[in-house]
Image (cartoon, rainbow, N blue to C red):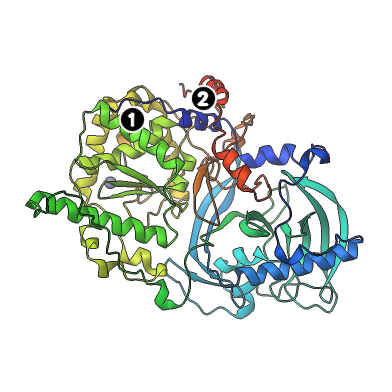
């Protein structure tokens, strides 16, 4: 028996609409208010086997020695892995009212090979690979003819120094102790020695005080050559496996908008790593093994399928193949709690529209940032970035209703993937080998059907916010070409114009950036947290931060990272999973923003 559910989880999310990001909140409270040390006894013994029989260091010199050993351990531990690396970058321009806003954007997605040095192969089409070694590895930017971002440059700071992290190349100066989240850290400033050569790390490292692993690096590389430029980076690691802090997020920013500053470049960029635990190996192993058990015969009496049943089984097989292949490539999160939230919304749309489908509709989260959706068989896929920027449940319903409409109207795509040979490709060419784009006629039909369904649903009263979201997207679309470029499904925009569900904008209130209680769209990264180790997604839990000016809204923008660091613990992971507190939900309902005129 299904019934319409009030989506409590999403109401928690609505609270986030009035927050900036977890980042701002963390930066404001964490370092200034370290909690008493006594309250922070480790819940388990340090788990790095290498350290278990070492006495605690008694001098700072011994600590530095330990840090160096731990960093080399990490480099070795990660060397067989090829995580996914995604960089999303916004070039900035100064808006007199809103401050720096995006003018243009760039998107890079690839796999990193951490075995010998740090190398990167891209999922997206390559444009020219003539760059020299130094620029490729460290520059991040070349300025021979015009500025050209080098994607690898953004991920270089996963280590301070891949090859020469030692006392021969660096001076370590102890600065102070500091809490980051739950983790007490020792802070060191690192400067390259005089004869250490070009491209050495220059900046600060934070080291946790139990096993002495680096948890954060902040700085740049010293002495660039004439034709390259080293970015400033803030690089974060998470304790996702016992004994190791895994490089997870890197924020980069350049540019100065103070009076009189003359800057040729101004940008901010987020780099995320994930898929550390994806199966890796030789090129042969990367080919997907053929799945033989995808069609299970559960019928008590063996009977041949009717033509329609056979057709449905065929579609199911294609759907399973695609979902499994995307998950294996690290592009789809494993099934989890975020799916339940999405499914509740789909369920509400189905019930109120009397939709009965032969197979249940499932939802899954694409791990990437570009705003896109598609469906394959009865599975609706929504990208992490799109869920991030949606302001509320009404706009989420809008996004899901379009894909549900495709399913209801029988716009099935992808049945060719029921042939298993079509799943045999390497991860890097996933985008070239899979595609779920509808023809314009089906897009229009899906929009029409979706709006019908929304109007008959519990979301009928919440379509103003969905319309406002489209207006905000329209206002920013010309500058966000890369964010709006879909890689598997139809793009939401065409030539800088929002096409998807655009009709909803006509009845929405006027968009007003200066209206502080009108939250039309959120910044990226504030809502969905992606685990770099196992690709699981969960909803970020963060206290709201009041918006005090139009500049705080930052719709569709990237912001710095400020993860709340905590030590690896199975117990705490469990506690977090069950911590959806009903009291929080109750207060949220009152504060969720209601867009008004
Ligand atoms: Zn569509």
Residue at 47 percent of width and 31 percent of height: 9
Farthest residue toward the top?
A: 590
Task: State left or right for residue 401 relative to residue 273.
Answer: left
Residue at 22 percent of width and 49 percent of height: 440
In the image, residue 253 lies at what x, y percent? 65, 55
The response on whether ligand 1 sits within 8 Å of label 2 is: no
Task: State left or right for residue 463 relative to residue 223.
Answer: left
* Residue hosting label 2: 592
The quadrant the N terminus occupies is top left
In the image, residue 560 lies at what x, y percent? 64, 48
* CA neighbours of label 2 inside 10 A, class few (<14), some (14 to 19), many (20+): some
Choose top left, top right, bottom left or bottom right for residue 548. top right
Q: Which mark identifies residue 506?
A: 1
Where 376 falls versus 472 (above or below)?
below
Where 81 falls versus 583 (above or below)?
below
The response on whether ligand 1 sits within 8 Å of label 1 is: no
Q: Secondary structure at mark 1?
A: helix
Choose top left, top right, bottom left or bottom right for residue 285. bottom left
User: Can residue 517 be spotted in the picture?
Assistant: yes
Q: Secondary structure at mark 2?
A: loop
């Amino acid at each position: 028996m299904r019934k319409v559910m009030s989506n409590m989880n999403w109401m928690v999310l609505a609270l986030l609409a009035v927050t900036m990001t977890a980042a701002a909140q963390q930066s404001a409270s964490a370092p200034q208010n370290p909690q008493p040390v006594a309250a922070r006894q480790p819940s388990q013994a340090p788990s790095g086997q290498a350290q278990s029989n070492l006495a605690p260091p008694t001098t700072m010199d011994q600590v530095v020695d330990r840090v160096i050993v731990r960093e080399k351990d990490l480099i070795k531990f990660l060397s067989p892995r090829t995580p996914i690396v995604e960089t999303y970058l916004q070039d900035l321009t100064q808006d007199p009212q809103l401050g720096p806003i995006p003018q243009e954007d760039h998107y890079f997605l690839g796999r990193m090979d951490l075995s010998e040095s740090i190398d990167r192969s891209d999922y997206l089409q390559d444009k020219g690979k003539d760059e020299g070694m130094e620029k490729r590895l460290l520059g991040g930017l070349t300025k021979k003819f015009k500025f050209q971002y080098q994607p690898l440059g953004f991920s270089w700071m996963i280590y301070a120094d891949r090859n020469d992290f030692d006392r021969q190349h660096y001076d370590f100066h102890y600065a102070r102790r500091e809490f980051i989240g739950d983790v007490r850290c020792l802070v060191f400033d690192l400067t390259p020695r005089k004869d250490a050569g070009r491209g050495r790390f220059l900046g600060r490292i934070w080291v946790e005080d139990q096993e002495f692993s680096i948890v954060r690096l902040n700085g740049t590389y010293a002495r660039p050559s004439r034709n390259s430029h080293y970015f400033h980076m803030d690089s974060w690691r998470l304790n996702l496996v016992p004994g190791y802090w895994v490089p997870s997020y890197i924020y980069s920013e350049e540019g100065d908008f103070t009076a009189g500053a003359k800057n040729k470049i101004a940008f901010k960029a987020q780099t995320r790593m994930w898929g550390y635990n994806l199966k890796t190996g030789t090129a042969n192993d990367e080919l997907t093994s053929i799945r033989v058990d995808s069609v299970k015969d559960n019928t008590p009496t063996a009977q041949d399928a009717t033509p329609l049943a056979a057709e449905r089984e065929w579609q199911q097989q294609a759907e399973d193949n695609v979902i499994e292949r995307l998950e294996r490539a690290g592009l789809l999160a494993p099934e989890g709690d975020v799916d339940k939230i999405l499914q509740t919304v789909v369920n509400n749309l189905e019930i109120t529209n009397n939709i009965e489908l032969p197979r249940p509709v499932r939802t899954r989260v694409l791990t990437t940032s570009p705003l896109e959706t598609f469906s394959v068989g009865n599975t609706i896929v929504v990208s992490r970035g799109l869920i991030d920027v949606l302001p509320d449940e009404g706009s989420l319903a809008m996004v899901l209703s379009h894909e549900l409409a495709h399913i209801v109207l029988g716009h099935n795509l992808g049945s060719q993937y029921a042939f298993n040979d079509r799943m045999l490709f390497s991860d890097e060419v996933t985008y070239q080998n899979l595609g779920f784009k509808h023809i314009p006629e089906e897009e229009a039909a899906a929009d029409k059907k979706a709006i019908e369904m929304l109007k008959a649903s519990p979301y009928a009263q919440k379509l103003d916010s969905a319309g406002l979201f489209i207006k905000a997207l329209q206002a920013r679309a010309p500058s966000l070409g890369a964010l709006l470029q879909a890689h598997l499904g139809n793009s939401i925009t065409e030539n800088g114009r929002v096409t998807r569900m655009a009709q909803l904008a006509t009845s929405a209130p006027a968009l007003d950036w200066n209206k502080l209680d009108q939250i039309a769209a959120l910044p990226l990264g504030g809502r969905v947290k992606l685990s770099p180790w196992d690709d699981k997604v969960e909803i970020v839990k963060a206290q709201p931060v009041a918006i005090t000016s139009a500049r705080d809204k930052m719709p569709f923008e990237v912001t710095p990272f400020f993860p709340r660091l905590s030590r690896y613990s199975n117990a705490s992971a469990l506690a977090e999973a069950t911590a959806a507190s009903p009291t929080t939900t109750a207060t949220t309902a009152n504060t969720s923003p209601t867009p008004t005129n």
